[in-house]
Image (spheres, helix red, strand yellow):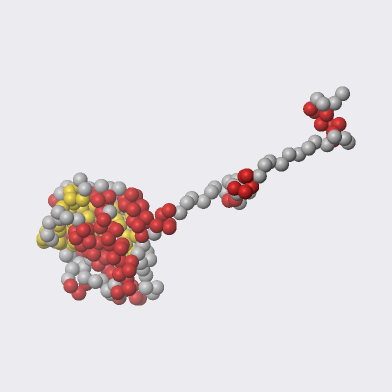
Amino acid sequence: MKLIVGLGNPGAKHAGNRHNIGFMAVDEIHRRHAGFQPWRSRFQGQVSEGRLGAEKVLLLKPSTYMNESGRSVGEAMRFFKLEPEDIVVLYDELDLPPAKFRMKQGGGHGGHNGLRSISAHIGTDYRRLRLGIGHPGDKKLVSNHVLGDFAKVDRDWLEPLLAEVADNAGLLAEGKDSQFANKLTLALEPEKARRKDKPAPARDGSPEAAKPKGQSHIRQARPPKTVSAPKSGPMADILKKLLGGGD
């Protein structure tokens, strides 16, 4: 059993908040994967059981409000006798620009009250999917920002992000976090994902010197130049002695 947790605040007035992007992502997983049961109340939250590939999965949206999310997650973890590594938490990240994401395991809470609560109840070794919502630029504006709704223009990046998270959630269930991240990067930032590695710099520090330049097809087609040896003079005498052509 794997536990995929989306963080947010319950109730219709919070449904569109930036703080609820974790709820949105888990809802999208539920919607796009057939076989998940209808949502029901359990573990102080809303849960749905199903499968992602070969893995049995419990989707969880705590109903405790963000600051007490750990009570819900801890209850589910203890019931199924899970380890922190079996749990993936999806949540909003101020320090990432909108549409960006990062996978991480362990670490601090970074000021996020949902993570603070979860870490207090189950430790810090659970896995995290950080979903960027951007920072308003002023600490005084943070509360209104996270508790404000996404704008209509945000749909251009929000919907593709949630769709890719849901479509590749099977990799999260299998513990293949690196492959999951690569899939999302390829879908959302194809140019970045396909960018070729730069050649290693040469000893003089110039990347151009690290790799010989290729010749054009015109230059390749030209016959090689022949250099005729001098027939007289000091150089001719030296060559005769070296090549055995002299007396």
x and y percent of residue 30 in the render? 19, 59
Give the left or right position of residue 191, taking residue 204 as reference.
Answer: left
Using the rendered image of the protein, determine whether residue 48 is visible from the camera's viewpoint.
yes
Quadrant location, the C terminus: top right
Residue 199, image x, y percentages: 53, 49
Q: Residue at x 21, y 48 (%)?
A: 53
Residue at position x 13%, y 61% in the image: 39
Please identify the quarter of the rendering in which residue 132 is found. Answer: bottom left
**The image quarter in which residue 38 lies:** bottom left
Q: Which residue shows up at 15% across the image and 49% down it?
A: 80
Residue 130, percent from left and from top: 32, 60
Given residues 232 and 115, the one toward you in this image is: 232
Q: Is residue 122 visible?
A: no
> Residue drawn at (81%, 25%), measured in percent from left and top?
244
Relative to residue 222, is residue 91 drawn left or right? left
On the rendered structure, is 187 left or right of 75? right
